[in-house]
Structures are given as structure tokens and as C-alpha cells.
Amino acid sequence: MANCPACGAPIEGHQEKCSYCGAVLPKEEISTPTQQPTKVKKHDRNKIVAALLAFFLGTFGADLFYLGKNKEGVIYLLVSYLSCGIGATVILVLSIIHMVQYLMMSDEEFDEKYNY
């Protein structure tokens, strides 16, 4: 229940004037909470799938291709192929690091980085 700003008398309902002193009452502004626009996901990539790809096919850059990092994926693939497997050990270590990074990210961080 509101009170009249002029005399302090209780006001019931939506009156335009105070029934005690006749003062014109201010109209209540209806405030609606502003709704922030929700981001629309461009992709529906999953961090578990990315981690599994990094673990099993990381030397071929499969996780990077899955996440849309095609240039890095091609580099991983070429280093593994052209070095006759010698560079694949370095790529394997990097892929395991990527796998741990994917799994340590929260879902929100992963979505922000790879799905929007």
C-alpha cells in the first residue's frame, strides 16, 4: 500500500487524486526488466568430443579441424606426415596438452571460445 506524497495518507488502488487532501498523485511507471539479448550459438561443439579427438587422433589435428581451426589442423597433419613420424611425437604432446585444456575448461568458457 502506498502513501500520498503530500499528506502521507494511505492510498488504495490506482487513484489519480488523494481522497484526503486532493493532491494529484504521480502515475506509477511500470518498469520491465530489460532482457539482455541471448547469444545464438553458431556451432554445437562438445568439449568431450574435442578431448577424445585430441587423445586418439591428435597427431592428425582432428580436434583442431573439429573446432574450426583448419589452418592449425593442416600444420599438425603436415608436420606428422612430412617428418615421417619424428614430428608426430611433438604433435602428440601438444595434443595431450590440448585435451587437458578442453577438459579443464568450464562449459561456458568452451562455448564462448568455440561455439559463438
Image: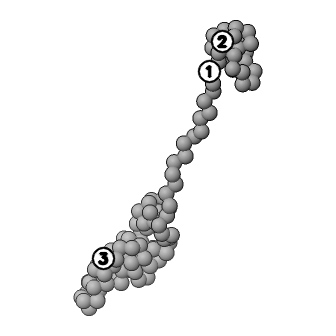
Front in this rendered view, residue 23 or 95: 23
Q: Which residue is mark 1?
A: 26
Secondary structure at badge 2 equals loop
Q: Amino acid at mark 3?
A: Lys
Give the class, few, some or many, for how many residues have Cα within 10 Å of label 1's Cα (few <14, many ≥20).
few
Total residue callouts: 3
**Considering only vertical position in the picture, is 43 above or below 32?**
below
Give the class, few, some or many, for how many residues have Cα within 10 Å of label 3's Cα (few <14, many ≥20).
few
Disc assigned to residue 13: none
Q: Nearer the viewer, mark 3 or mark 2?
A: 2
Disc assigned to residue 71: 3
Relative side of 15 to 70, left or right: right
Relative side of 75 to 12, left or right: left
- Do we see residue 56 in this rendering? yes
Secondary structure at badge 1 equals loop
Q: How far apart in space, not on screen, are marks 1 and 3 (Cα)?
A: 63 Å
- Do we see residue 89 in this rendering? no
Disc assigned to residue 23: 2
